[in-house]
Image (tube, grey):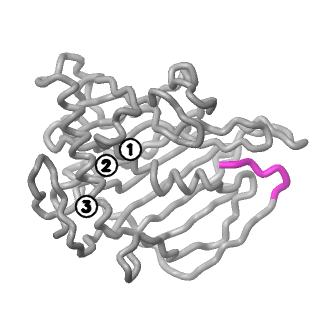
């Protein structure tokens, strides 16, 4: 998000109707867990520098994921039944298959971005509902369903914000991308009724013009797919007058069509520290953001998803 020095309101209106996110398909009592997690208090965002070839450790040694307490069992620090390297290999291969499968689904995405005042009340909001679909030629596209007036006054949505919404909040760590990250085994942890392997993830090198995740992931020990992502997209742009900051976030997935874990809900919250520029005073802005993904439907295709050398049941044909 970028700070607005002189308060201006940009109007953006279209007709349509947003649908509520359905939690009934989640595993038993998981809906209650996710609601509890979504109520986690604001966490102060720590900005990172974005110079080329800056390592994650040097960029921000103090960064820690958002605290998640409710519904999480104690961390088991004993060694996993198979080496962590094999777990990483298995789940990154599965994530590659998941990303390929996701390319054959349509879905609805509802985005809410709010600024919160000192009395914890909403004083500005951006809201938009989009259908992520395919055009007649089979190309992925987005169609705005509903976009009421944008009342954000203290910040404006930047191109990086929209890229985060489209690409990085539903984080996928594939076998093609894993070489860019340090992936460190933390332990085993039970979330609701799901036993997970837990890994810390940080970019090895942050190249100019690219964004990465720094945080923690929970991997289902049976399905070998990411089910929770908790962290921050880095680096932020810290140049005075050009500051572009983002809060830490948590993304939850659930099983769709009984096979792949698709993102269904993202919660982001933090206090963004804008130092000011171009004659503007600095300001702290409390941000709250949610993204809800619903109505997943498989789109017909001649493609076949291959995992471990075999066509996957339920994958598009």
- Mark 2 and mark 1 residues within 8 Å of each other at the beta carbon: yes
Q: Is residue 84 inside the magenta stretch?
A: no
Separation of marks 3 and 1 at Cα, in angstroms: 16 Å
The answer to which of 276 and 191 lies nearer the viewer is 276
Q: Looking at the image, which residue is at 48% across and 38% down?
A: 212
Residue wearing tag 1: 36
Where is residue 41 drawn, in percent x and y?
52, 38
Q: Residues within 10 Å of mark 1 (few under 14, many from 20)?
A: some
Residue 291 vs 251, above or below: the answer is: below
Q: Looking at the image, which residue is at 54% across and 20% down?
A: 62
Mark toward the start of the polypeptide (3 vs 1): 3
**Residue closest to the far top:** 78
Residue wearing tag 3: 24
Q: Quadrant of the C terminus?
A: bottom left
Magenta-colored span: 1-7
Residue 31 vs 46, above or below: the answer is: below
Q: Is residue 6 inside the magenta stretch?
A: yes
């Amino acid at each position: 998000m970028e700070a607005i020095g002189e308060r201006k309101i940009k109007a953006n209106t279209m007709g349509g109707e947003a649908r509520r996110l359905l939690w009934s398909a989640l595993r038993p009592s998981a809906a209650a867990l996710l609601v509890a997690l979504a109520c986690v208090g604001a966490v102060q965002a720590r900005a990172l520098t974005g110079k080329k070839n800056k390592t994650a450790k040097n960029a921000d040694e103090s960064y820690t994921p958002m605290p998640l307490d409710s519904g999480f069992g104690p961390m088991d620090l004993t060694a996993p039944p198979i080496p962590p390297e094999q777990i990483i290999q298995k789940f990154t291969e599965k994530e590659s298959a998941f990303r390929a499968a996701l390319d054959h689904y349509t879905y609805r995405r509802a985005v809410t971005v709010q600024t919160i005042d000192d009395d914890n009340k909403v004083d500005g909001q951006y809201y938009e509902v989009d259908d992520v679909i395919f055009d007649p030629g089979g190309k992925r596209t987005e169609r705005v369903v509903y976009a009421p007036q944008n009342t954000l006054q203290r910040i404006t949505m930047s191109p990086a914000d929209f890229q985060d919404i489209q690409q990085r909040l539903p984080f996928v760590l594939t076998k093609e991308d894993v070489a860019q990250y340090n992936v460190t085994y933390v332990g085993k942890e039970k979330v609701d009724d799901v036993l997970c392997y837990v890994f810390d993830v940080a970019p090895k090198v942050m190249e100019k013009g690219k964004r990465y995740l720094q945080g923690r992931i929970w991997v289902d020990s049976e399905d070998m797919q990411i089910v929770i992502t908790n962290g921050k997209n880095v680096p932020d742009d810290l140049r005075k007058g050009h500051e572009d900051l983002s809060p830490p976030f948590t993304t939850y997935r659930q099983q769709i069509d009984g096979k792949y874990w698709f993102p269904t809900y993202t919660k982001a919250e933090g206090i963004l520290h804008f130092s000011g520029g171009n004659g503007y005073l600095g300001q702290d802005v409390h941000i709250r953001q949610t993204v809800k993904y619903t109505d997943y439907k498989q789109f017909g295709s001649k493609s076949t998803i291959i995992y471990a050398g075999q066509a996957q049941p339920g994958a598009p044909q």
